[in-house]
Amino acid sequence: MTRSRTVRLLPLLLLLLLLPACVGADPMRTAADRATYDWFAPMHRAYVTADPKLDEAAKATHLRGLDAWGARIAADEAAAGVR
């Protein structure tokens, strides 16, 4: 394959690789993510808040991670029309 042909086909390849990202949230995966979060998050939140070895900054980091995970799931649910 010549260099010019490769250069012309590269944008097409990149476009094809990006197309699956445009599909949106999968309702079944979103429901599974929600079930996992609903099971795990309260348990982890209680553990983090009660752990005497974690300072306040570490606790805040862990809790921000849980909140970000929940927010991502809520956004996926809205996109998939699940909740």
Image: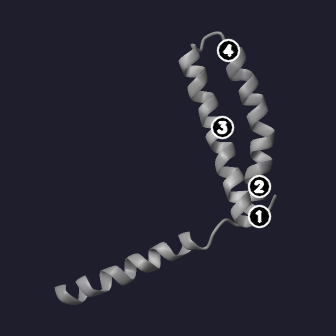
Question: Local crowd at mark 2 within 10 Å, few (<14), some, or many (≥20)?
Answer: few
What residue do we see at 73% from left, 65% from top? 80
Give above or below for 42 relative to 77.
above
In the shown orientation, is residue 47 left or right of residue 39?
left
In the shown orientation, is residue 79 left or right of residue 8?
right
Would you identify the image quadrant in which residue 75 lies? bottom right
Q: Secondary structure at mark 2?
A: helix
Give above or below for 54 relative to 60.
above
Asked if marks 3 and 2 touch (Cβ < 8 Å), the reply is no
Q: Secondary structure at mark 3?
A: helix
Three-letter code, disc 2 = Ala
Give above or below for 43 relative to 28.
above
* Residue 17 drawn at (x, y percent): 45, 74
Q: Disc 3 versus disc 4: distance between alpha carbons?
A: 18 Å
Three-letter code, disc 3 = Asp
Q: Disc 4 versus disc 2: distance between alpha carbons?
A: 28 Å
Which label is found at residue 51? 4
Q: For mark 3, what is the residue?
A: 67
Q: Nearer the viewer, residue 43 or 77?
A: 77
Would you identify the image quadrant in which residue 28 lies? bottom right
Which label is found at residue 18? none
Which mark is first along the chain, 4 or 3? 4
Q: Secondary structure at mark 1?
A: helix
Q: For mark 1, what is the residue?
A: 28
Q: Quadrant of the N terminus?
A: bottom left
Three-letter code, disc 4 = Asp
